[in-house]
Image (cartoon, grey):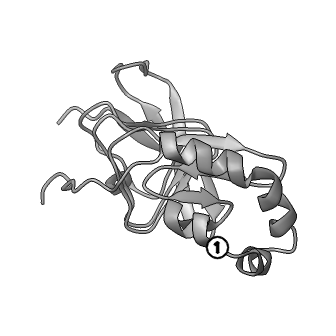
Amino acid sequence: MNKKYEILEESKIDFRGRRLFRIRATKSFDNVKEGDIGGYLENEKNLNQVGNAWISGNAKISGNAWIGGNAKISGDAEISGNEIIDRKIACLNTEIWTITFGNKIQIGCKRYSIEQWTNFTDEEIAMMDIRALNWWKKWKDIVLSIAKIACFEPVETKKEGE
């Protein structure tokens, strides 16, 4: 198989106890040009070599997370765990935390469904971080409005080879 990207072993970071590597496009596809530098992966299992999926900027993909289809992950997005993403992810950088909209809403390192974020009490938000309640009061309506447009339900997608 002619791979669409390579892992740059010399360009690595340690992120939350994991070693992630930058990627570089080895051929042109979609809006990606051969030689473009992408985001960070833990290993090749995180990004499908087939299709138009791509990770750019400082986006970080780790654990068993898998990006495929036509998904475009960018900015400071952080995808980990067992997430399967095959669509575009939206990110918003605020004065304190980056917000990632996808199957769930991730604010900083806290990741929950739209329903959970909607139903959290002030006390629950305050327990997340000393700055969280004031931030949430300022950003809640904006975050939930964007989420109604940008978030989507998880899609049953099988990884290549399953």
Residue 30 in view of the camera? yes
Residue type at mark 1 is Phe
Residue at position x 43%, y 38% from top? 88
Residue at position x 69%, y 45% from top? 142
**In the rendering, at what x and y percent does residue 61 appear?**
48, 54
The residue nearer to you, when weighing 114 against 71, is: 114
**In the rendering, at what x and y percent does residue 15 appear?**
63, 63
How dense is the environment of label 1, judged by Cα within 10 Å: few (below 14), some, or many (20 and up)?
few
Q: Which residue is mark 1?
A: 120
Q: In the visual, does 137 lie left or right of 53?
A: right
155 to 82, vertically: above or below: above
49 to 82, vertically: above or below: above
Which quadrant would the N terminus be assigned to in this image? Answer: top left
Residue at position x 65%, y 49% from top? 143
Q: In the visual, does 32 lie left or right of 125?
A: left
Which quadrant would the C terminus be assigned to in this image? Answer: bottom left
Residue 22 in view of the camera? no
Instruction: Spot the residue most to the left.
Output: 162
Q: In the visual, does 70 lie left or right of 20?
A: left
The residue nearer to you, when weighing 17 against 99, is: 99
Q: Secondary structure at mark 1?
A: loop
Residue at position x 38%, y 61% from top? 83
